[in-house]
Image (cartoon, rainbow, N blue to C red):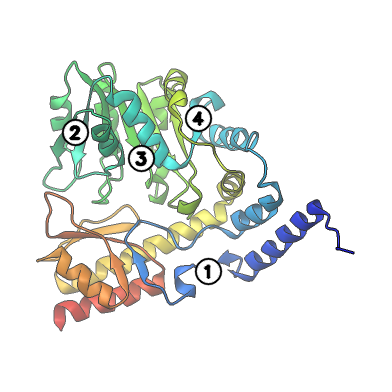
Amino acid sequence: MAPTFDRRHLFRASGAALGVVATGLVHGGLRRAHAADNNGPIRLVANENPYGPSASAQEAMANALADGWMYATTEARVLRGLIAEREGVEPSNVLITAGSGELLKMAGLGFGQTGDVVAARPTFSMLVGYVRNTGGTVHEINLDKNMIHDLAAMEGRISDNTSLVYVCNPNNPTGTLSDADTLRSFIDTVESRTTVFVDEAYVDLLEDPSSNAMVDQVKAGKNVIIARTFSKIHGMAGLRIGYAIAREDLIKRLRPLQMSFLNVMGLRAAVASYKDIEFQEFSKSKIQECVSITQSAFEDLGLPYTPSKGNFVLFDTGGSVRAFSTAMRRKNILVGRSYAPYESWCRVSMGTVEQMAVFAEALREYYKG
């Protein structure tokens, strides 16, 4: 007689087993990095955070395994409420998306079809690229001499046909931070003429995130959309959870453009990680340590770089980025690419502290022979 199985019991057992596996990966209450646990290449290429997800997020995912058959109906509401409470806004001012990437594309589609978009060059390309891919027009303004957004020049490019201005702050790929008061003044000047989209993917990595965040502009009723993500400080890039904070009318304008369903595991992990302040502080401290190691190596070698406020550093290779990347790949290290107009500059994402020490040694070997 064939054995019979209680499927509900099987799901629970599987969840428990996964919980054991997750617990086994925890050291000192915090999960070790995937990249440090195998012989694969060191990934310094995609601005990922190998210190996440947190142990609490992993436990939440393990417990959610048995509920993977369900659509996420309540989880987004829970997360939206937590974000609203912490930021001092209403839940109606928050929209949860499949990573901030989905939000960037939603804004690119929703605003790029009704007018042109003004953005810096270089900056994170997802929104501006999506505008172009869907037939819209983007006006790019070069960064200033310090590789910071030239907000005065961006203001000068705004016309009656401009529907959106995109400001990534801190900026990717330069890691530079626009002065908060200057950015607020810029918003105050232009928001009656166009919507300002402020991408704050890296704001949680700053020493004082609240002073540099533009949530106060939303509270003041300004024509501003803020993007945040769980991919950076929370180390959840593969789980695709992000969110917008904006006036209710802007949230309503964006919501119909949402392209995908959110997933139960990612949302529950996000809820757990959002509450886990201890992990967030740990994550930030490790990233800052990695940035310090990396920038010190550049200084020792006399290589120009931009002091970074993100989890990456842009530096001048002094030659061919392709040649540098190829040499690093031979050492099992993956690094980023160049960004016009800085053709000899390369972006290096942060791995673990141990991995950045390996990169620093490879860097010295490349330049000193």
Quarter of the image with the N terminus is bottom right
Find numbered disc 2 in the image and state the secondary structure of the residue it sits on.
helix
Going by the numbered disc 1, the residue's amino acid type is Arg
Q: Which secondary structure lies at badge 4?
A: strand
Q: Is residue 258 left or right of residue 196?
A: right
Furthest-right residue in this view: 1
Pointer 4: residues within 10 angstroms few (<14), some, or many (20+)? many
Q: Mark 3 points at which residue?
A: 212
Q: Residues within 10 Å of mark 3 (few under 14, many from 20)?
A: many
Q: Name the residue under label 2.
A: 151
Asked whether the residues under the numbered discs 2 and 1 touch, taking CB atoms below 8 Å apart as contact, a structural biologist would say no
Residue sitting at x 63%, y 64% = 22
Between marks 3 and 1, how big is the CA–CA gap? 30 Å
First of labels 4, 3 by sequence position: 4
Can residue 210 be seen at all in this image of the molecule?
A: no
Depth-wise, is mark 4 or mark 2 nearer the camera? Answer: 4
Q: Nearer the viewer, mark 2 or mark 3?
A: 2
Disc 4 designates what residue? Answer: 94
